[in-house]
Amino acid sequence: MLVLVTPLFENELTHEKFEIDQDRNVEHQKIDADIIKMLSSKFRRRNIYRLRTTNTYVIETLSNETVDDITDIYFSKMHDPITVTFILNKVKSPTIITFNTYEIKPDEDYDNITDEQLANYNVMHVLKEGGLQLYELKLDNVFLNSTAYAGSNFFDTSLLDAECVNAKLFHSNFNDTKLRGANLNEADLRFVTFKDADLSQNRRSGGKTTLVNANLRYANFERTNFTGADLTGADFRYAIFDSGTNFTDCTLVGTQFSGDSWRGTIYTPDSMRDAIFSEEEEEEEEEEEEEEEDDVDETEVEDDDTIEDEAVEGDKNVCLDYIYSDDKNILKYLQKNPLNFVIKKTNGEFECESLNSLRKQYKNEERRGKYKYYGYYECSKELMDKVKRTGVTPADFGVDDYDATKEYVKIGSALTYIEKPDWMYAGTPPEPRIFELVYTGLKKYLVEKSLTRPDANIISSVHCDLNDYFEIFKLDPVNLAGNMSGGKRKRLTRRKHLIRKKRTIRRNHLTRRKHVSRRKRFTSRRKHTIRKLK
């Protein structure tokens, strides 16, 4: 088997931590050779080498050493740090070396990490920043039992017959990975992506992939091949599947699914009868509750037709109704409807806004005629780094591809992106209902929240493209008194005023809905929706 070890270097004098790059200079090449000598002195007659350009080394175990022996033979000998002298920048530098095998320490409590904590974008970012880059490698028969490689990148790596029992691998990337014959029993694989991964039987060795009692909640299994795998007791609740997920001939005794999320997959009916679908009623009730919450403020608040809010000659405090291209008296416009509010643009001019209109713009069909409000999320740094590196814009999105902790919406005639206020989807704007657009100093890559659902249509949408990079503003309240003259646009003649007043009665019966952009509709919908994380 293969044992992985990563040396961590710290200059004893400056306490500076560093890694070595064998291609950078001769000094680092010498350190690399010294590390292999150190490991060879500890483990004689083993083949030891550096794993390509990574900072990780591989020790090949002896043929007579069993899986049960590895922890005692290899991990225990690398617990204590050592101090050696290296030449760095032509200066002799005493260096402390700690060999990290990533084994779970007794004081590390991984079992109590909750789904809510893992769903937090900052937690995910920290894990991925600290994870190892082990992509496009050959690591067949690697030993990862009771280790913590959370947040690591195993993209397109061969892990045939790998031993990963009780491994903590949440938020790792196993896209396009070959895991045939791997032992993942009791592994923690929450929020892991397995797109196009192969977890079927290893025909060459005869080993069957096993995930007995594995925790796979919120993982992404689009186009994943489980053919013949033993999934006894595995927890697939809230996981993502699609028509390419293959459960043919799997052992599914006691396997947990959320409701009917598995129905769109490829499966053997006899095997699926042994699975558990106990969450179906609970999940449907939660979805209904969420939909009811979203529908609370769907009913429009009608305008008070007794209030004439058209601006007249001499009005100074006016805002532009950009939908109808009319000027409104700000005070009367706010009195006319409690869902009306005003924004002061960066050029000093004022625009009239209405939650009646905006909520129609944000509303998207969820399922069976039910609707939810959708704005925008920030694309994850990892996803955008990949887009910049490959030039390929993503066509679908997993839970790791965006930050769901903060939402953004578009507002105003310029379609400015702002941090979504708490009252945008429910309730009324806080007084004085006049807000200034303030630039946060940030620009972000965004994706439409509706596109994070399976089978969404990305055509003409904002979807983490390199061009989907926008300045972010926020709404700060502004008092009506003082500096309102900036909203004055033009003097109205009496004739124009009378014509506009005559049109008012007819206009009040029109809906603003036809004047806003049509919402994007999904081309198809799956029956299962990932439950919202608190």
Image (cartoon, rainbow, N blue to C red):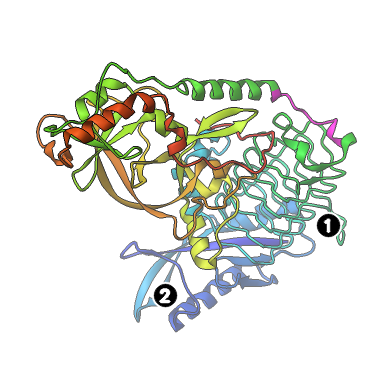
Determine the residue positioned at 14% across, 32% down. Answer: 315
**How far from the left and from the top, in percent, is residue 524?**
67, 41
Q: Nearer the viewer, residue 159 or 145?
A: 159
Indicate which label's residue lies in the foreground, 2 or 1: 1
Residue 216 drawn at (x, y percent): 67, 40
Q: Amino acid at mark 2?
A: Phe
Which residue corresponds to the image point at 75% horizontal and 65% vertical from the top-left?
62
265 with respect to 148 (left or right): right
**Label 2, on which residue?**
86
Q: Is residue 407 magenta?
A: no
Q: Nearer the viewer, residue 362 or 43?
A: 362
In which quadrant of the rendered image does the N terminus lie? bottom right
In the rendering, which numbered label is found on residue 90? Answer: none
| Residue positioned most to the front | 495
Residue type beneath disc 1: Asn
**Crowd tier of the residue under label 2, counting other residues whose Cα lies within 10 Å: few below 14, some 14–19, many 20 or above:** some
Is residue 423 among the parts visible in the rendering? Answer: no
Which residue is label 1 attached to? 202
2 or 1: tag closer to the N-terminus: 2
Verify whether residue 277 appears in magenta: yes
Question: Which residue: 49% across, 54% down?
Answer: 464
- Which residue sits at x=26%, y=25%? 334
For the magenta stretch, what is the residue range? Answer: 271-280
Task: Name the spot of residue 522 as percent of width and height, x first.
Answer: 61, 42
C-alpha span from label 2 to label 1:
45 Å
